[in-house]
Image (cartoon, rainbow, N blue to C red):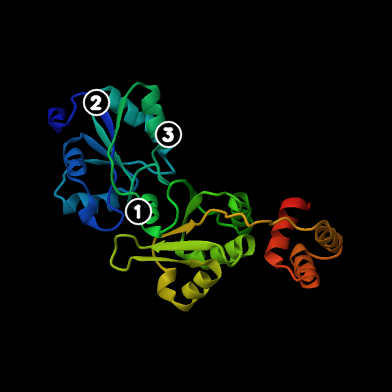
Amino acid sequence: MTDNKTLPTEVPTLYIVPTPIGNLGDITQRAIEVLSTVDLIAAEDTRHTGKLLSHFCIQTKTFALHDHNEQQKAQVLVDKLLAGHSIALVSDAGTPLISDPGYHLVNQCRQAGVKVVPLPGACAVITALSASGLPSDRFSFEGFLPAKSKGRKDKFLEIAKAERTCVFYESPHRILDSLDDMLEILGAEREVVLARELTKTFETIQGMPLGELIEWVKSDPNQQRGEMALLIHGYRAEADDTLPEEVTRTLTILTKELPLKKAAAMTAEIYNLKKNALYKWGLENLD
């Protein structure tokens, strides 16, 4: 077993170690040193992490800790730490706990008085935000978008008037459906950035009004592949975006006989307004 005295601290410690999100050159020297000298590496996928360790000639043993076993296995690792071992926590890519396993382990370590040391390093959220061209003074990371259309629409409705930049992860097989749902709630003019395959050979960071972005993604199947982040510009209030009472009354009456989408389209035609604004008002104000 590795001698703990080669570690930066002799106190048994849980190290939170970011790993590259694509380019292996992005790993830090400190991360390599910690992974080489801890007693055990808790990994989301031991086979995936094994390839990284092999690349850097690291022979430390690994322990599988993933979404399906973390609550059961976290205490096993805490017991090892309390017995004097040091452990590194890694995910498949990026910073652990950021839409990856690790919360239960870190929480239990802190409750047990185990020293927890985070290392800075790769994180897709921050990498995407830094190059997006969107405001970065206020932002929120919202995790993966819901798998179902209704859940996505509810989430977009929730952040529709948030003034901060919002960042989501999305899977390639759902990207077009998610963009279409986003269009229905946020409208074609909202600025959105697609950050894809960050730090990899085919890295793409493309921002434009949502209506244009959808057409761009649909026209190029390559933009529908790989690891993705979607960044949404915060809401910018217009001088007066309130709907006249006459308009909302008409919409309310029509929705008693028609689906909201159809009622919004008809009301928009009657009053020469944008149907997206009417549809959003209906979602927010009508049962």
Name the residue: 33% across, 65% down: 203
Q: Which mark is residue 127?
A: 1
Name the residue: 21% across, 42% down: 31
The vertical placement of 230 against 70, above or below, is: below
Separation of disc 1 and disc 2 at Cα?
Answer: 31 Å
The quadrant holding residue 98 is top left
Furthest residue toward front: 239
Disc 1 on helix, strand or loop?
helix
Separation of disc 2 and disc 3 at Cα?
Answer: 18 Å
Q: Nearer the viewer, residue 243 or 197?
A: 243
Mark 2 vs 3: CB contact within 8 A: no
Q: Position of residue 48 (x, y in %)?
A: 29, 53
Residue that numbered label 2 is attached to = 12
Q: Nearer the viewer, residue 112 or 18?
A: 18
Q: Is residue 60 visible?
A: no
Q: Earlier in the sequence, mark 1 or mark 3?
A: 3
Q: Amino acid at mark 2?
A: Pro
Q: Earlier in the sequence, mark 1 or mark 2?
A: 2
The vertical placement of 207 against 94, above or below, is: below
Name the residue: 49% across, 52% down: 165
Camera-side mark, 1 or 3: 1
Camera-side mark, 1 or 2: 1
Q: Earlier in the sequence, mark 2 or mark 3?
A: 2
Residue that numbered label 3 is attached to = 104
Local packing at callout 1 (Cα closer than 10 Å; few below 14, some 14-19, many 20+) is some
Separation of disc 1 and disc 3 at Cα?
Answer: 26 Å
Drawn side of residue 127 relative to residue 280, left or right: left
